[in-house]
Amino acid sequence: MSQAVLILAHRDFEQIYELSLRLKQRFAVYIHFDRKMTLTSDEKRKLETEGINYISEVDVKWGGWSIVEATIRLIRFALRDENIEFFHLISGQDWPIKNVDEIYHYFEENNDRIFLDVQSVKNIKKSGEPIEWWLKYYYNYDKINRRSFSGKIFHRLNISVQTILRINKFKKLETKVEFYTGSQWFDVPREVLVYVLDYLEKNDELYKLFKTSFCSDEFWLNTIVMNNAVFRKRVTGNNHRFMKWIHKNGSYPAVLDEDDYLDLKDSNAFFARKFTNECSKQLIAELDKALGKA
């Protein structure tokens, strides 16, 4: 069975290149480089020489629709190869924490299952906000920097004003689905990706809702899959990803380092994040040693 790893990358070409070399031992590799990353002719040559597929089409902004747009373009790019039957989505700051053969064989033996982190949006709060508000109200974080000081102020004011005005996209756009949330990272059969792209294309109201929401990458695919009666029975609820939801090494979730090695070793996850060249080199060396890479 042919499998592909899809990578959303936004920084550090050398780390992404090393990640791709490890994965290509068993997987086809497809990368979307954030358009803000300017690849040199030498970097492009290195990718092409190794048969690593890549595009760079979308300027990705945190919290904006552009993340989903990049994901969709990457999926469409990979689907061109009709031989690929199973797909994994990771970030350019992920790293495999099991042997690539073990990862490949696990999904080969479980290729009818949908590995997706899902939960209903009802009664869930993040940063003190019901996340239903992230879908119910209008946002445009492809033009406004949500992570800036002014962006944070705008976010609070935007929600307050729309609450007072009783804005409700659910009613305006007449979307008749139950909404689900969860991690954007997935491991799914080909038929799932074909279905979700077709569904989104045919349901313009739902497309408009997601496009004007906040952090749609945490809703769109999860929602479409869970509203399919056949697919939802195949969802495992576990996407085998390891993350530490703490502030560490200047990041939330944590940038992992050698102090996290034992936690990774004892984990049943296949991929972990975040890794950076600045903080994670020793951790990668320890993982390589344990997994038999010289």
Image (cartoon, rainbow, N blue to C red):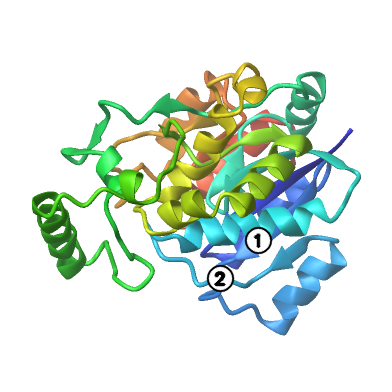
Q: Find residue 271 and report its horizontal and vertical position in percent.
A: 59, 35
Near mark 1 (Cα within 10 A), the count class, few <14, some 14-19 or many ≥20, is some
**Residue 244 falls left or right of residue 109:** left
Image quadrant where one finds the N terminus: top right
Kind of residue indicated by mark 2 = Val
Residue 191 visible (yes or no): yes
Kind of residue indicated by mark 1 = Arg
Q: Nearer the viewer, residue 128 or 290?
A: 128
What's the CA distance linking mark 2 and mark 1?
A: 9 Å
Identify the residue at image location x=84%, y=56%.
80
Quick check: marks 2 and 1 in contact, CB under 8 Å? Answer: yes
Image vertical order of residue 212 relative to residue 113, above or below: below
Q: Nearer the viewer, residue 135 or 218?
A: 135
**Residue 80 falls left or right of residue 95:** right
Describe the element under mark 1 as helix, strand or loop: helix
Identify the residue at image location x=53%, y=51%.
93
Residue bearing the label numbered 2: 58
Image vertical order of residue 271 relative to residue 53, above or below: above
Near mark 2 (Cα within 10 A), the count class, few <14, some 14-19 or many ≥20, is some
Describe the element under mark 2 as helix, strand or loop: loop
Q: Find residue 119 and report its horizontal and vertical position in percent.
A: 42, 25
Q: Find residue 91 and report its horizontal and vertical position in percent.
A: 56, 50
Image quadrant where one finds the C terminus: top right
Identify the residue at image location x=62%, y=56%.
72
Q: Which callout, 2 or 1, points at the residue further toward the start of the chain? A: 2
Residue 274 visible (yes or no): no
Q: Nearer the viewer, residue 170 or 149?
A: 170
Residue bearing the label numbered 1: 73
**Residue 192 falls left or right of residue 276:** right
Q: Find residue 90 and report its horizontal and vertical position in percent.
A: 59, 45
